[in-house]
Each structure stands twice: as structure tokens, then as C-alpha cells.
Amino acid sequence: MNLLAAAPVPRDLPLPLPVPEWLLVFCLVVFFLVHILFVNLMVGGSVLVVLLEWMGLKNKRWDALAHEVAQTITVNKSLAVVMGIGPLLCINLLYTLQWYSANALTGHAWLMIVPLVIVAFLLTYLHKYTWDTWTSGGKKTLHQLTGLGAALLFLFIPLIFLANVNLMLFPTEWEKVKGFFSSLGIGNILPRYLHFMAASLAMTGLFLAGWFGRRDSDLSHLEGFSRPELRRLFYKVCTCITLAQFLFGPLLLFTLPAAGITTAVYVIIFSGAAVGLLALQQLMAELKSPDAAIGGRYGRIVALFSVVVLGMGSGRHVYREAALAGHQAEVKERTARYAAALAEFNKGQAAKPQPAEQSAEQLFMNCAACHAPAVKLVGPPLTEIAKIYAGNPEGIVAWAKAPGKKRPELPQMPSFAHLGETSLRKIAVLMLEKAAVK
């Protein structure tokens, strides 16, 4: 039984790729990982700022820390947008039919991404630059709601992207989709989203542990926090969320639709999990380190997480290729059948005898409804035309190609340029001959 029997199989346009396919695949994986890193930091940072500012209602030092973390969000947001162009271009080229089909099926939600991003960015800047004035001016609640609004948008926008990327993998499910919300029932959206959220918080915790742990960082405005304390705080965030990932990871893996599951996928994922355990062990060792030594393993932890992330990106691509292999093969086959049928049709048309060239009398039938030899019909008779264009058939041709309007009592003549220069000259000569006979 053909599992793709219910899947729409459009024909493709056999256009060459601008660069070798392997290079596009490499760029897709690498560019996507760089893009998603900054998306993680943007989303995770927004969530942490909301939590820290809420904690700051009881202890001002948390509010000061939230303000400092908020400074990083706008930078990470800009990098996330810029670095998102590369993977979008690559996926458009590699999976054109599947990607645009998913875009169309999610409909209004996909079209709303740009307006939602603009609103989220404006709220983020408003939250960042009104921190002191709104806090001191008694508008702290409004300020918190502004930050919460930006964070909620940052949480929702990736869900639209995730729904699209997920939906493109399962062409057999496309006919069931009736818009964005119905697309959330395809595949394993919820486990993927939980995994993404956990990764965002873990990466943000690791980033902030390094950001505040820099020796040249000025922490004088963060009263009540020492550099080792900040490192330890964000190490804890990263450690706790990484532990949670060992719950979300298996949930994601075992809810993956079977369409793309291969041995290679399992090998990549379990290898990444093994490296993740090493990273977790290093994080726990850091938490036990004395203040003077904490941070010594930071480079090692970043390297281990980089391997995990690279494995996740590679595993995602291997799964995608396997899930779409059947559909792409059917699209390729249909495209080849269409090309062969078109070639056969063109060959048959070329073999047919060409129609005989029309005579001037036959061509004049295009004009006879409006122009009689000596009687005025819709347009002037041929005798009147001959007086204007005597010995000048080219003038009639020029008029027929781009007619003007000389007489208000007569309707506008349509252009007959579609008949071609040769046919129009035949008609013009015949019109002058008919007028001369009369």
C-alpha cells in the first residue's frame, strides 16, 4: 500500500539550484543553529526578565538584575532576525513545495508573523527604556505588563514557525489542516515546543553565567551580588533545565511520527544525549566549586553543549530528509512524467501539417462587420478610407495597430495588432482595391 496515496503531489519546476545541494544542506544546518541560538537567548532572556522583575517587588536587587538582563535581549533579538535570513533562503530552495504548502495551510498566522514581531520588538524597547522613569513614577505594574506582553509574543511567534516546519514534513496530513490551530494537531508539536522552551532557558542560563562572569564586567550597579554568586545563580538555572531536558528529550523522541525515524536518527540523538550527560556532570562540578574557582570549566561546558546542539541540528535534518524522501520521489516522478508528456505533445504538434496561410479575403472578415465597401456601418466605408489613405496601405496598418478616435459619433475602434504586420498589410491592400472597384 502506498503511504503517500492521500498526499497532494504537485509537479515541480525543474530549475537548477544556484549552488550544489550539499552546500545548501550544510548552510541550512549551520545557519539554523546560529539563528536558533539567538532565538533561545531572546526568548529565555524575556522569560527570566519577567520572573526577576516580579521577584524585585520584594527585593530591589532582583529588579536591578532584571534590568541588566533586559539589556541583552534587544541585541540578541536583532541577531536572531538577521541570522534567520540564511536558513529561510536555504529551506526555500531545498524544500520549496513542502515549505510553501505549509505556509499556505497555516494561513493568517503565517502572515501575522511580521506584525507580531514588530509589536514584540516595540514592547521590548519600551520596556527597556522606560525602566527607571516608570518605576520611579509609580507605573511599575504597567512596566511589568509591558515586559510580560513582549515575552508572551516571543513565546507565541516561535510556535508559528514550529507549526510550519513540522507541517511541511507530513504531506499526507495536509488535507486535514484548516488553518494554524488545526495544524497544531499534526506530528508532535507540544513535545517539540516544550523542548524548545527548555533549551531557551538552559542556553540563556549558560550565556548569563558567562556574561556576568567576565572579569571586565562592571557589577557595581548590582548591589548584593558578587561575580561568583551570579555565576552560580545562572549555572543553577542551566543545570535544572538541563535535567528537565532528560525528561522532555525522550518525550520528544518517542512521540516523533515514524515517517522519518531511521537508525541514523537514533544514533545521532543518543550520542548527543551522552555528551549532554557529560555537560551536566561538568555543570554540577562547577556548582560545587569554591567561589575562587568557579568558572574554570565554563569553556569546557560551552564546547560540550555545542556538540549537543550540532547533533540536534544534524539529527533534525536527517529526520526531515527521511520523512520527505517518499514525497519528494513522487514529486520528481510526476515532474518527469509531465516533462515526457509535454515533449510528446510538442513532437506531435510539430508533425502536424501547418494550416494554409489565410488569403486577404479571409483576413478581411475581421473588418467586414464594421466596414462595407460603400455603405457606412459601425465604421466608415472603404470608399472614405481610400480617400484618406490613397496609395498608403502602411497608414491603414499603422492605424489598425493603434487606432485613435477622430469622429465622436463613431465608437472607438479596437486594436488589431494581434493579426500581425503581414496580415494587416494584406487587408489594407484589399481595402484600397475594393474601394477602387466601387
Image (cartoon, rainbow, N blue to C red):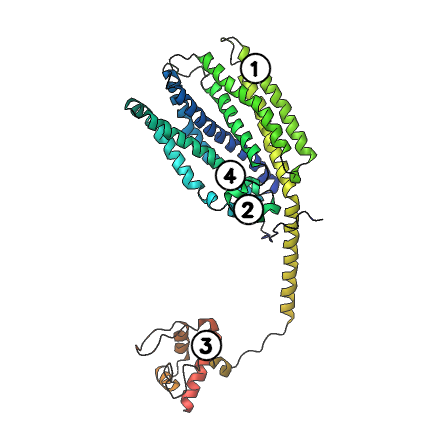
Label 2 belongs to which residue? Answer: 177
Numbered mark located on residue 424 in the image? 3
- Which dot, 1 or 2, sits closer to the camera? 2
Local secondary structure at mark 3: helix
Going from N to C along the chain, the mark reached first, 3 or 1, is 1
Q: Is residue 409 above or below residue 190?
A: below
Residue 18 visible at all:
no
Q: Amino acid at mark 1?
A: Met
Is disc 2 placed on a helix, strand or loop? loop
Which residue is at the far left? 137
**Is residue 220 placed above or below 258 in the rendered structure?**
above
Residue shown at 55% from the left, 15% from the top: 297
Residue 327's spot in the image, x, y percent?
64, 47
When asked about the image quadrant of residue 380, the answer is bottom left
Q: CA distance from mark 3 to mark 2?
A: 55 Å
Q: What residue do we see at 56% from left, 17% from top?
A: 283
Residue 99 percent coordinates (x, y): 55, 45
Disc 3 and disc 4 in contact, CB within 8 angstroms? no
Q: Which mark is residue 284?
A: 1
User: Residue at left 57%, top 15%?
Assistant: 284
Percent position of residue 321, x then y: 63, 40
Upstream in sequence: badge 3 or badge 2: 2
Distance, label 4 to label 1, CA atoms, is 34 Å
Q: Earlier in the sequence, mark 1 or mark 2?
A: 2
Question: Please, what is the three-letter code of the amino acid marked with disc 4?
Answer: Phe
Q: Which mark is residue 157?
A: none
Q: Amino acid at mark 2?
A: Val
Work out how far the residue at label 1 is from the one at label 2, CA to CA, in angstroms. 45 Å
Residue to which mark 4 is pinned? 161
Residue 36 at x, y = what percent? Answer: 51, 32
Note whether 156 is above or below 211 in the view shown.
below
